[in-house]
Amino acid sequence: MLNFEPFSISSLQKALPYIKKNTSLCSDLSAGYLFMWSDDADMKFCIWNDTFSVMQNVGEQPAFSFPMGADPEGMTDELKQYAYANDMPFRFFGIDEERLNLMRADSRLQPAMWAYDRKWSDYVYDFAEAMSFPGKKFSGQRNHINKFKKLYGEPEIRFLSKDDDESAEGLLKKYESEHTGTNALEKKELEKTRELYGVHEMLGLYAAGMFVDDELIALSIGEVMGEQLIIHVEKALKEYEGVYPTMYSGFVRLMADRLGHPLKYVNREDDSGDPGLRTSKQQYHPICMADKYLVHIDSPAVRFTSHPMAFGDGVVLTEFRETDREAYLRLNTDADNNRYWGYDYREDMSITGPVDENTFYDMTALDEQAGDSVNYAVRLSENGEMIGEMIFWNFTLKGNIELGCRLLPEYHGKGYGKAAFGAALELALRMSDNDVTAKCYLENLPSYRMITDNGFILYKKDAEYYYFAFPGTGRLMADEDIKKQVSVEAVAG
């Protein structure tokens, strides 16, 4: 069985030989990315038979990176066995077009469902063009650089040392004060920038700064992976006109001098869906976008592609409709109502643009396309308005289907949740090869009753949740004693 271990500065040293040889244009398996986001995504890695793979949480569910090294085919088999043995979904993240095509042609990885989100696509530029911004298409960038030099003089751009630590922190504090309205992702990214700067040399990364009158006004951190320079950090004081193109081009030239030759590509990573950042990165004329696919192998979602309707006592479950966008926005942004759903959109780092009626509707469509969930609208009649959501998710390789239900507040206490859950259960039992499960927070008594009133059996608890399975499905078939549990107190005791 594979052994995954957490990332740390010391353990990353084991991964660096594989990372440096990575030929993908996606930045997701670079040392800087892994260091910055390992804690938030619960990243772990495994080296097996001189082959490397990462496991991380994507959308609250684990996923693997495409194996790199001596035996990717053998490790793919090992990953599948690992997913099955640990009752996990068999998913892959950060898959580029080349690897997606390989996976689609691999009979071991069927059936497959996949999707990508444009906001996570990396911007890839020509390294030589970034050094000098030649030709008419870069006239805007050259004009900004010329204006910068006219206003502030010729800048000093150099690699930073320990002697510059205080200046770097001063720059980041000023940058933070200039960006007070940042979202959850931007705040986290700034926090991780500080951490990455502190360890960049240990990871083989390069940190450079631009000085005007001995003041550090811009900072970049990058690394070389394959034939590209990946720039993880670009921070500058916006009070200096033209600072970003000046620093960007200067950093690329500085790297070429250090390496003794130019590389082929510059990867400036994604735009996170930020409209201003997207416009800016497009203006630098990328030669391609490195799209990253999320791939789910053998998901039970393939059996729901037609969204068959389900009927309960006074409720109907149907697929989402365009007219549901406003109600679904209200369902997702009611913080009090979502307290026992375990969700607060204000802390969701996947939301990077303005929150509107498209935000959650589009996120759900992406999850369904990737095979990660199937979402039903709860209605009082077939053509009625959405009053809540029924979700089928946590699709594991063993065939598990987990059910979840939430309603708009005005429909609580009327029995609609119990009816919707019962209708969903009947549908899930037809679609599942193994378990039909559910869970709820310990303090969520209404959900506890909704689940157990539909015949689910409580089989365990932890510090946060009660866990239930439906009798006759895989999780309870082998242990008759579990079926005899009759109260929460028996388990809690």
Image (tube, rainbow, N blue to C red):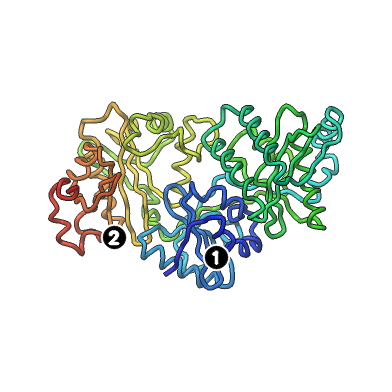
User: What residue does disc 1 label?
Assistant: 52
Instruction: Give the quadrant of residue 431.
Output: bottom left
Instruction: Give the quadrant of residue 395.
Output: bottom left
Q: Is residue 124 left or right of residue 61?
A: right
Residue 423: horizontal and vertical position, in percent?
A: 25, 44
Tag in front: 2 or 1 = 1
Q: Residue at x 76, y 56 (%)?
A: 264
Residue type highlighted by circle 2 = Asn
Q: Nearer the viewer, residue 379 or 220?
A: 220
Q: Which mark is residue 110?
A: none
Q: Is residue 255 visible?
A: yes
Q: Is residue 326 above or below residue 82?
A: above
Regarding mark 1 in the picture, which secondary structure is present there? strand
Instruction: Give the quadrant of residue 484.
Output: bottom left
Q: How many marks?
A: 2
Residue 118: horizontal and vertical position, in percent?
A: 58, 44
Q: Residue at x 25, y 37 (%)?
A: 444
Residue type highlighted by circle 1 = Phe
Q: Is residue 321 left or right of residue 114?
A: left
Q: Which mark is residue 434?
A: 2
Q: Is residue 226 above or below residue 373?
A: below
Residue 260: horizontal and vertical position, in percent?
A: 82, 58
